Image (cartoon, helix red, strand yellow):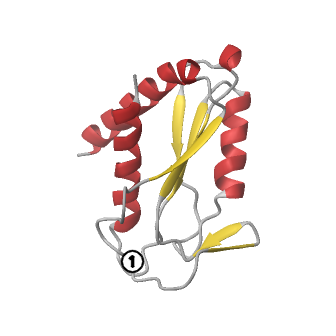
Amino acid sequence: MICTTLTVVVIFMIVVGLVSPIWGQKKFSMPLWPERAVEQNGIRAIEVIENHHLINITQGGITVQFPKVDEANGAAILICPGGGYRFEAIYDEGFEFANWLNEHGIAGSVLKYCLPNGHASIPLTDAKQAIHIIRTHAV
């Protein structure tokens, strides 16, 4: 299982890294699920930002940030920001890290995953969906 997961991550990094100079966009965002996630976390409160942290996340998304075309080196990384499943440090551990990766020629894809709220499989399901979306849209 670890070998399969590692293979998927490596393929993701290669595919996105190869197509990022072709796309020519600096940054774009999209939802992970067309309508609703397969499993709901039961959070009813509105998603808000507190101290640069997202809380009450019920709908996942992905934001892909590309380096400048002339600086792209073909690598890419899916970033899953931390927060102890209470919040998501999407700015400090997501977008700032993606900016740092861009400065080094690497495309950074920041995952906004749903908080589990007692449903342990939800963040992993969102991460798998993010990889699926990126691989599906790779050229």
Compare residues 125 and 25 and report the one nearer the observer.
Answer: 25
Rendering quarter of residue 32: bottom left
Residue 42 higher or lower than 79, as above or below: below
Q: Residue furthest bottom?
A: 44
Q: Is residue 111 left or right of residue 125?
A: right
Residue furthest right in the image: 51
Instruction: State the SS at label 1.
Output: loop
Q: Residue furthest front?
A: 35
Rendered residue at 58%/57% (across/down) = 81
Between 116 and 45, the residue placed more toward the observer is 45
Q: Is residue 12 left or right of residue 92?
A: left
Tell me if residue 53 comes above or below residue 95 in the rendering: below
In the image, what residue occupies the spot 38% across and 42% down?
133
**What x and y, as percent, mark residue 135?**
36, 34
Outermost residue toward the top?
Answer: 70
Dot 1, how many residues are within 10 Å of its Cα: few (below 14), some (14-19), or many (20+)? many
Q: 45 or 78, which lies in front?
A: 45
Q: Is residue 97 left or right of residue 40?
A: right
Q: Estimate the x, y position of residue 50 in percent, counting from the top left.
A: 72, 75
**Residue drawn where x is 39% and y is 33% of the image:** 137
Residue under pointer 1: 41
Quadrant including the C terminus: top left
Q: Amino acid at mark 1?
A: Asn
Task: Tell me the quarter of the picture where residue 103 sits.
Answer: top right
Give me the residue at 64% from left, 58% from top: 90
Q: Position of residue 67 (x, y in %)?
A: 67, 27
* Front-most of residues 111 and 86: 111
Is residue 72 shown above or below 90? Answer: above
Count of numbered badges drawn on the protein? 1
Q: Position of residue 113 (x, y in %)?
A: 48, 61
Picture layout, residue 13 above or below residue 30: above
